[in-house]
Image (cartoon, rainbow, N blue to C red):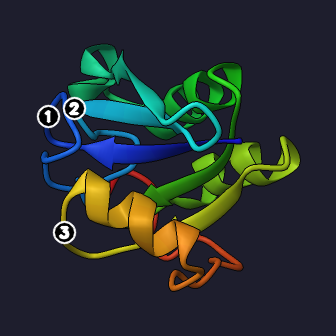
Amino acid sequence: MKIAVTSSGTDLLAAVDTRFGRAPKFIVYDLDGETFTVLDNEMNLNAAQGAGVQAAQNVVRAGAGALVTGHCGPKAFRVLAAAGVKIFTMESGTVAEAVERYRRGELVEAKAADVEGHW
């Protein structure tokens, strides 16, 4: 299974970014293969609107079954939930910590968006 983590950088030591749609990068970690890829989210950093929906579509296309982020808005949440992607929140830490906390079952699954759109 793959999990996507919003990231401020390009490796596992990068900080988890608290924004979903406007996170600079996504680290997509394959729990089975112990490998990861980096998805660039540059196109959404300054988007006037639709950043969350486009980012959600990219995460779904990457094959992630779960997402770890700081916050997720309502439109992105709907896209992810409709695709079966489970959403977990984490306010701080590194991508590696997010992966480990996910593995240990320490993250709580979000049941709804926790910020308004255009956050």
Q: Earlier in the sequence, mark 3 or mark 1?
A: 1
Pick the residue in front: 85 or 116: 85
Label 3 neighbour load within 10 Å: few <14, some 14-19, many 20+: few
Compared to residue 47, the image places residue 67 above or below, namely: below
CB within 8 Å, label 3 to label 1 = no
- Which residue was labeled with disc 3? 93
Q: Looking at the image, which residue is at 74% across and 50% down? A: 85
Q: Secondary structure at mark 1?
A: loop
Q: Looking at the image, which residue is at 36% across and 74% down? A: 90
Q: Position of residue 54 (x, y in %)?
A: 54, 25
Q: The C terminus is located in which quarter?
A: bottom left
Cα separation, mark 3 vs mark 2, equals 16 Å
Q: Looking at the image, which residue is at 64% across and 78% down? A: 109
Q: Secondary structure at mark 3?
A: loop
Quarter assignment of residue 24: top left
- Which residue was labeled with disc 2? 24
Q: Position of residue 103 (x, y in %)?
A: 55, 68
Label 1 neighbour load within 10 Å: few <14, some 14-19, many 20+: many
Residue type at numbered disc 2: Pro
Label drawn at residue 9: 1
Residue 16 shown left or right of residue 86 in the figure:
left
Quarter assignment of residue 111: bottom right
Residue type at numbered disc 1: Gly
Q: Which mark lies nearer to you, 2 or 1?
A: 1
Cα separation, mark 3 vs mark 1, equals 13 Å
Q: Looking at the image, which residue is at 33% across and 24% down? A: 44
Q: Earlier in the sequence, mark 2 or mark 1?
A: 1
